[in-house]
Amino acid sequence: MAQEDTLVSGVAGRYASALFSLAQDDRQTEAVAQSLFKLDALISESPDLDRLVRSPVFSANDQLKALDAILAREDIGGVAANFVRLITVKRRLFYLRQMIAAYRKLYDASRGVTRAEVTSATVLTDDHVAALKDQLRATSGGRDVELETKTDPSIIGGLIVRLGSRMVDGSLRTKLNAIRIAMKEVG
């Protein structure tokens, strides 16, 4: 439990820790994780659902009715659904996405997985992704790395890598900006 406390904190962390502990007791950490991640994806894709979750304007009953319909439609049940209902009744629903992020940290740590986000100017090939995973695995002490790739043509070239709380910006855009600043200081 002490390690869990260092991974997550605050209100969202406390709720996520309690949920993770309950899911472990029921041997349902995987099922709860999948349900929560599915719900998080739905929230990020729907501005209306995001507004329902974050806005204090809606009553707990209105939020609960809407969420019950969504949970049933998406076949999200069990511990995850009961958790969402509980935080809705307790008027903590606006913390839901933070709670899901904290649960993800606990879940990843329990599986020995580290998450990395890589931004590149163009889509990376499978060979590049595999090589990058190998390098990140070595950097993270041999832990498995789940890689999320994004493309952003504005970085011109290179990579921006976030591994846990560390970030390395090796983008060409950043290097060109540094040169421009250096040239201004000289002139």
Image (cartoon, rainbow, N blue to C red):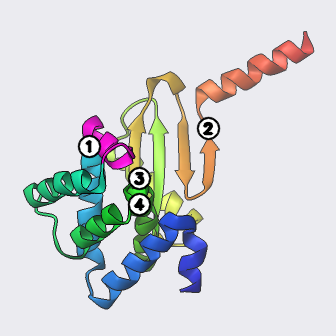
**Which residue has dot 4 on it?**
92
Give percent across and percent down for residue 28: 25, 81
* Span colored in magenta: 44-58
Circle nearer the N terminus (1, 3):
1
* Kind of residue at disc 4: Arg
In terms of secondary structure, where does tag 4 sit?
A: loop
* Kind of residue at disc 1: Leu
In the picture, the disc for residue 94 is 3
Is 51 inside the magenta-drawn segment?
yes
**Which residue has dot 2 on it?**
170
Q: Residues within 10 Å of mark 2 (few under 14, many from 20)?
A: some
In terms of secondary structure, where does tag 2 sit?
A: loop
Marks 1 and 4, Cα distance to the nearest angstrom? 15 Å
Circle nearer the N terminus (1, 4):
1
Residue farthest to the bottom, as pictured: 25
Marks 1 and 2, Cα distance to the nearest angstrom? 36 Å
* Kind of residue at disc 2: Gly
**Which residue has dot 1 on it?**
49
Residue 147 appears in the rendering: yes
Asked whether disc 4 touches disc 3, contact meaning CB atoms under 8 Å apart, the reply is: yes
* Kind of residue at disc 3: Phe
Asked whether disc 1 touches disc 4, contact meaning CB atoms under 8 Å apart, the reply is: no
